[in-house]
Amino acid sequence: MTDATMTPPAPKLRNIVQEEESSQAAESQYTLAALEKHKREGLELAVKARWIAMAIFAVFLLWVHPHFEVIYYIGILALLCVNGWFIRRIGRVGRSRMELLLIFIDLFLMTLGMVGPNPLNMDMLPLAMQYRFDNFIYFFVILALGTMAYSWRTVIAIGIWTLVMWMSALALAWWFASPVPGLSEAAAAAFGEGSSLAETLDPNSYAVPIRAQEVIVFLIVAITLAISARRTNTLLLSNAGLERERANLSRYFSPNVVEELSQNDEPLKQERIQNVAVLFIDIVGFTRLAAGRDPHQVIVLLREFHARMEREVFRHNGTLDKYLGDGLMATFGTPSAGKRDASNALDCALAMQDSLAQWNRERRRLGEPEITAGIGIHFGETLLGDIGLNRLEYAVIGTAVNVAARLEEMTRRLQTPIVMSEDLRLQAEQETPGRELSEGFACYPEQEVRGLDAPIKVWAKR
């Protein structure tokens, strides 16, 4: 065997590669869209929660410290609200330097408000006293809000940035701020020189071990939340994959079958006997129509025909059982029986005829030949169930299916677009009392149907 026989032609190979790349690109785009939606929803929620939290903090500050200098802290809360608005505007999936900068500004404003001296405060308190108010707990609010919208890496970054910023502020305060004279001496005199109590209660003491404890606990919490956020992202991507698979299923199965499949781990149901409305449609004279035409044109014609007919099947709560070359088979009442299965089948057949009429008007304008189709509909007993072992197919079989197919063939002999059985007509009238279905149809009693022992009554569209 030569290399030429083993290697596919270059154009075919390129097509395969292009199809694979297109599939991967579509999958990536689908996942990116899911992430973008998650990011947008998270940002919206986080910003709204931020605004509510800052409003609560502002009221709380006014309550516990009803003095003029509290305006400084309320101003910082307002800046945090404005910064949140900017984050929402520019937030997107992926690494954004501007978004990271705004998050950094968040932490800087928080640190400045907690550690820096209040310019409106006239009291000469030691700067170390700023650390005694336990304001560090407010950083946990920013961290919690961050888990709603940011990646796990960003959550860890918030933890690390807070540690560095808080300890840097502590170092700068310790280096540049001057202790208030006499306070350390008074604490030593009151509690004993060198005692731990004197060091703890010294107004000039920064209590460095406690400050380190704060940021270490904060970093541990940040890492824990980041791991949780990463697991959430994994679940999101998995869910996006499931939604993509469901979307792919909907390209081959009708929505009601996809819904049934998505809600059950087991095959649809055990085999059972059930009354179902069955519809067959087929293009009349397709062989003659396709003769001499370019195969690509034939495929395009079939795709448009199938798309129009499929749309009507789904619109009338039907199940597209299978494509049959230039036709299709649809069922109404599968996988679960409904209250209007026969009526839906008849309405679908009439809607298909209207859709073909509209399509033919378009084709006449383009100088294309008209498309005519025969439709057969019947209501009767069928056997439903899965066939196959690993590759399952939901099958609808039985005499009712055969009768519907024969009625579709009968449209040629009766020169009509639609033939329905008496059984379907009676069932449809029972489903919708007061509806007279014989109008617009001609009755043909005693019609021989191949496969049936006795002739049946049928109705043909005038």
Image: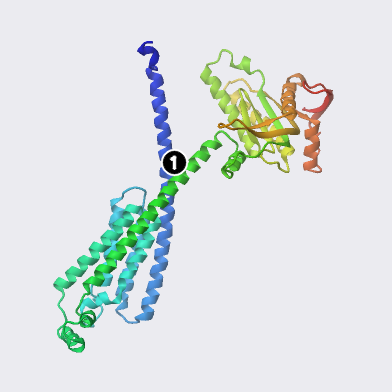
Say which of 406 and 285 sits in front: 406
Question: Dot 1, how many residues are within 10 Å of its Cα: few (below 14), some (14-19), or many (20+)?
Answer: some
Please indicate whether residue 27 sits to the left or right of residue 215 in the image. right
Residue 72, quarter of the rendered image: bottom left
Question: Residue at label 1?
Answer: 30
| Visible residue check, residue 350 | no
Q: Point out the image quarter for the C terminus.
A: top right
- Which residue is painted at 81% across and 31% down in the image? 422
- Which residue is painted at 54% across and 22% down in the image? 299
**Looking at this rendering, what residue extends furthest in the top direction?**
1
Say which of 270 and 302 sits in front: 270
Residue 109 placed where, x, y %? Answer: 28, 66
Residue 252 placed where, x, y %? Answer: 56, 33
Q: Point out the image quarter for the N terminus.
A: top left
Rendered position, 460 above or below 78: above
- Which residue is painted at 16% across and 82% down in the image? 194
| Secondary element type, mark 1 | helix
Rendered position, 206 above or below 385: below
Please indicate whether residue 454 sits to the left or right of residue 207 in the image. right
- Give the tally of numbered discs: 1
Q: What amino acid does circle 1 point to?
A: Tyr
